[in-house]
Image: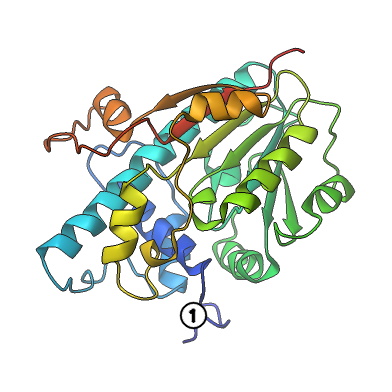
Amino acid sequence: MTDAVGQAGPSGVWATAVGVARVRAMETAGERPLFRDPLAQAFATAGGRDPGAAPPARADEASRRRWLGVAFSIVIRTKFLDDLLERAVASGVRQVVLLGAGMDSRAFRMDWPAGTRLFEVDTAEPLEFKASVLRQERAVPRCERIVVPVDLRDDWPGALAAAGHDAARPTVWIAEGLLIYLPEDAVRSLLDRVGALSVPGSRMGLTLGSRGVVERFRDDAAAGSAASMWVWEMPEDPVAWLAGLGWEAETFTLRERAEVYGRPLSTPPQRDEGPGGLVSAVRPAH
């Protein structure tokens, strides 16, 4: 497949980032969007996921409902992390790191205080695809945007430092839709590295896969779909788990946040919903 800007289309795990862009484009086009992402449609269209095209046929009602559930979670988590970032910079944080940045366009669509530096960490392939779309759209970032092409399995802290990240200053870290694709040891390694680069006052926003939900969606998912690649379920007590890693955390369910945002769910809670998979954390003074 060739995309609209002349490169090979997305493939593998990062292709899910284009699907996320499609959902964000659909939300942006709605009557009362929770956020506006003007670049989402360009990313989705270039990756062969035109938001204006007819949605792909679903094999059955259950798969259609699963897709709607994933799309809903993307919308709610986007709003949640937007708010978290706004609170972080209001507290004085001026370094932002997006881990597995994908098609994230926050550098372009959010208002940032002067002096904000935003680092996008991802592998070279999606970042090159993204750069071609940004050139096509003549997009201009609203802060200092620094791209860090590196695999998160490699020495990404070294690459981040070489790109100008200052570990002596507070940072707000975002891992959105990422940890669910990593095995448990990789999740622990990633968060250990984040912790080593986080001075007191640093913040972190995570999205975690709810226990039970991950297994249920993965087992029912079509081969090659995003859910078929889900691996890691969050711990039974994510607050205690993050405390052990040096963070003071709060968790929220999608249902709780949706209610706050004026998008209440009409379906009854599932028995396996458990603790919330939306996480806001702060690095306290030792």
The quarter holding residue 100 reads: bottom right
* For residue 49, side relative to residue 81 (left or right): left
User: Can you say which quadrant of the picture contains the C terminus?
Assistant: top right
Relative to residue 60, is residue 21 drawn left or right?
right
Of 254 and 101, which appears nearest the observer? 254
Residue drawn at point x = 60 percent, y = 31 percent: 204
Residue 137: x and y, percent? 54, 62
Across and down, in percent, residue 193 comes to 75, 41
Q: Residues within 10 Å of mark 1 (few under 14, many from 20)?
A: some
38 shown above or below 17: above
Q: How is the image coloured?
A: rainbow
Q: Amino acid at mark 1?
A: Asp
Residue 226 shows in this picture = yes
Any part of residue 197 in sight: no
Q: Which residue is identified by label 1?
A: 3
| Image location of residue 56, percent across then percent down | 23, 73
Q: Quadrant of residue 246?
A: top right
Q: Residue at x 16, y 73 (%)?
A: 59
Q: SS at mark 1?
A: loop
On screen, residue 72 above or below 17: above
Side of 29 where 120 appears, left or right: right
Q: Residue at x 41, y 36 (%)?
A: 277
Residue 167 image offset from top left, x and y in percent: 84, 33
Residue that appears at 44% across and 56% down: 40
